[in-house]
Image (tube, rainbow, N blue to C red):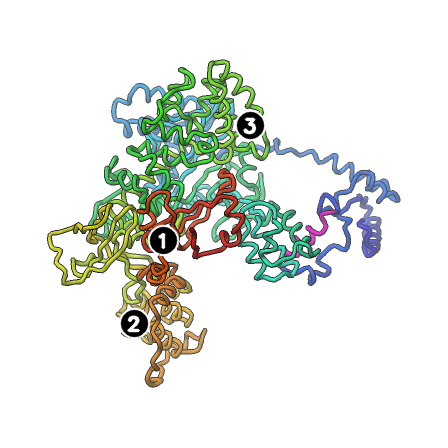
Amino acid sequence: RHLHAPEERAEQRLRRRAARFDIPVAAGVEVLYHTRARRSLQDVLTCIREGVTLDDAGTLLRPNDRHALPSPDLMRRLFRDDPAALERATGIAQSCTFSLDELRYRYPAEHLPYGMSQARWLDTLARQGARDRFGEPVPDDLEQRIARELVLIHDLDYDGYFLTMYEIVRFCREQGIICQGRGSAANSVVCYCLKITAVNPREVDLLFERFISRERAEPPDIDLDIEHGRREEVIQHVYAKYGRDRAAMVCNTVRFRPRSAIREVGKVLGLPAVNLDRLARMSGYRGELQEDDLTSAGFDPRAPLHRHFARLVDEIQEFPRHLSIHPGGFLLGHEPVHDLVPIENGSMADRTVIQWNKYDVEALGLFKVDLLGLGALNQLHIAFDLLREKGGPDLTLARIPRDDRATFEMLHRADTVGVFQVESRAQMNMLPRLRPETYYDLVIQVAIIRPGPITGGMLHPYIDRRHGREPVTYPHPDLEPVLKKTLGVPLFQEQVMRLAMEAADYSPGEADQLRRDMATWRSHGPIEEHHERLVTRMVAKGIAPEFAERVFQQIKGFGEYGFPESHAASFALIAYATAWLKCHHHAAFTCSLLNAQPMGFYSSGTIVEDAKRHGVGVEGVDVCVSGWDCTLEVARGVGGSALRFASLGATRRFALHPTSNLQGANTVQTQASTPTTVIQKVTEGPLRIGLRYVKGLHREPADRLLAARAERPFYSIEDLARRARLPQDALIALAEAGALAAFAPERRRALWVVHGLSRRDRPEQLLLPLPDRGPMPELPKLSELDEVNWDWRRSGHSTRDHLLGPLRGALRARGWPTAGEVAEAVHGSRADYVGVVICRQRPHTASGVTFMTLEDETGFVNLVLWSQVYDQHKVLARTLSLMGVS
């Protein structure tokens, strides 16, 4: 009953049918929101679901606001004419006593050798792996640690889970798929012996209690990173092994954020799309709409409709929008999973997904297997294959030389565009200050630019101690073993746990609970329960109150994004491998990075420009030679090579005339003002951009093009169109990208030919020989700026020049320097600069400060916008692509 007249007739029909079949009736209402004030939001959600505007919704919407959750008194008044129906409804509610605690779950058993139990088979594999890893005999300390871990694994009945992960890793190795375990699993020497992780416990002393705790008694968490290009093979292997009824992927709940809320709510209310797009671009990832943002986007905050719009946008945020599939979480069961939770088909082919997310699975204590795609592993595999195909070294992750001096010197220069985990603006800023010299230094480098160390005030003390500007001291002698490797400064989650154990007498299980509370303190606030206990006990042991409070603030910082040492140790291995590749095989590094996109921090434009600045020859898309992916071509001789300038990280690219005489010389010193500029000859490449980078060219027509070219080369645009059966939009994309230059060097001439071939969307017409249409008219040539602009519009980058290259003369005339010249300027001097914005960051730990990275043809300029400057120029700071700063 909702006080809606048509319901009376429907209720009478229902009562007559119930009486005819002698079925008792129960009272009820349709509840769509908890309070009547939410009716307007419910109407908006209905319109979003149905894809209509509010004006066109009609009977899709409920007619009044009587669909709120009623109070018991309201229910009694609604059904005062039939209290028996209300009593029956109450009885039904009281009989619904199901609890999730009633669920019974068993982990699936693995196939075992004859006569072996799971525990015995795991023991055998772990000890065999220990001999493979450490040789015979296995060192006593490691033997004892393996035995201790195995006892705990057996006692908690986790053997099957470890065997599952071992089997998946074995499958990856057999199929040549690069994978690496990370997360808390890196704290386990058993995982290292099973080759699940690559973190050697001899190099990194990690905390097993972060992985498995007897007191916590919940499933361990092993994240397996798999090269993302082949992760689907592993996922389908899991489905094939366990069956669709016993394996399903965990869901992910996608929620409304400011940008999606602005666009969806505005569309329902019929607001102009242009204004909505501008407002969405100015909004952040979270937070309420501000009046000045509405005004800047062309809305009037005083208008009732626009006030209503702003209120609805704020209310709808964090509402579930739709279900998607978790990046790689699997729920496996001995019995059919659908006995626990419904399974549905995923939007991706051959995927099934449950209706619980990872937090639901963890709360119920169920085992989840995480198979995560990692682009950096895919990039490494591609690079290894490229080098092998071109006669280079036969590399794997394990075969990359360790402690390479040239690689660490490159890291000191912060020359890390595209290098895994250390390519961000903040990491580039920190690298010359920290100056990593060893693998463990890189572990610290990966982890130090995180909210935990920053908010805890640990970053600067560590840097000063590392370089001898501050003595290494410990707040208490008992804490020296915990903090020695980080010079007395706690940087990792594991160290915070050990601090609690040593300085506040936490048990291992309590320390792990502290770690878990770190991750949820903003949403649930349990971390404050540890404050008094931690600080009081530290002070009682003679630790300075200031240090105790700093440690607690760092714990809260870890709640934002606490980076564990185990994660950093796993990531540092990959970071070093990608850095080594960039240092010694830059062309293969760039080619593999482009083929592994999307991944990483930078767009293809920045990656290509960085390669050119390092002297890698880069050739544009060409239908006569390009494959779908980018490729490495045979390196040219000295004639026609490129030169590179290297000066304080800023580089410029020049063409060397074929008649120049550089035989026997790899570098040429030039006279220049300090610092000296070195011109270095290109020895790698060229790299050929693949067809995948032509926007508007899809894989199917590209495959037809490659198949036709494999039969015999193309001799004209007409021949290409006819034999590859390319639709006109694909031909236009190729022409605008400059990919038809072999037949028509001028792009406008190529477009003229393409438009003359056939009518749009009639590719079958291209099979017919077409008559000559007469002489081609004289078409104006594209300017250098237009050519570069067309490159960026169609490919996201240009092999010819940076976007600002053709404008350099005009910029120079105004006295505006390049990024390289800004880098060489005297510290503290005033400078004007114009660059392309490639990165914006406004971390909540920075007290309103915004960081940007601007780029030109010579390198980067990092920009810091203080909050008052940002507020003064908010619209420009949020929306400009080309920015001038003073």
- Percent coordinates x, y for residue 841 in the rendering: 46, 45
* Comes first in the chain, label 2 or label 1: 1
Q: Nearer the viewer, residue 369 or 336?
A: 369
Picture residue at 32% right of the left edge, 47% below the top:
825
The image shows residue 812, relative to residue 423, as above or below, that is below
Give the spatial CA distance, label 2 vs label 1: 26 Å
- Left or right, residue 625 beside residue 835: left
Between disc 1 and disc 3, the foreground one is 1
Give the spatial CA distance, label 3 vs label 2: 66 Å
Query: Which type of secondary structure does the marked residue at label 1 adopt?
Result: helix
Asked whether residue 264 is in view, the answer is yes
Where is mark 1, residue-wise?
Answer: 606
Q: Which mark is residue 397?
A: none
* Comes first in the chain, label 3 or label 2: 3
Between disc 2 and disc 1, the foreground one is 1
Q: Which mark is residue 745?
A: 2
Q: Nearer the viewer, residue 860 or 711?
A: 860
Q: Which mark is residue 527?
A: 3
User: Is 88 within the magenta?
Assistant: no
**Magenta residues, start to end:** 37-48
Q: Main secondary structure of the magenta part?
A: helix
Q: Amino acid at mark 1?
A: Thr
Q: Amino acid at mark 2?
A: Pro
Contact, mark 2 vs mark 1 (Cβ under 8 Å): no
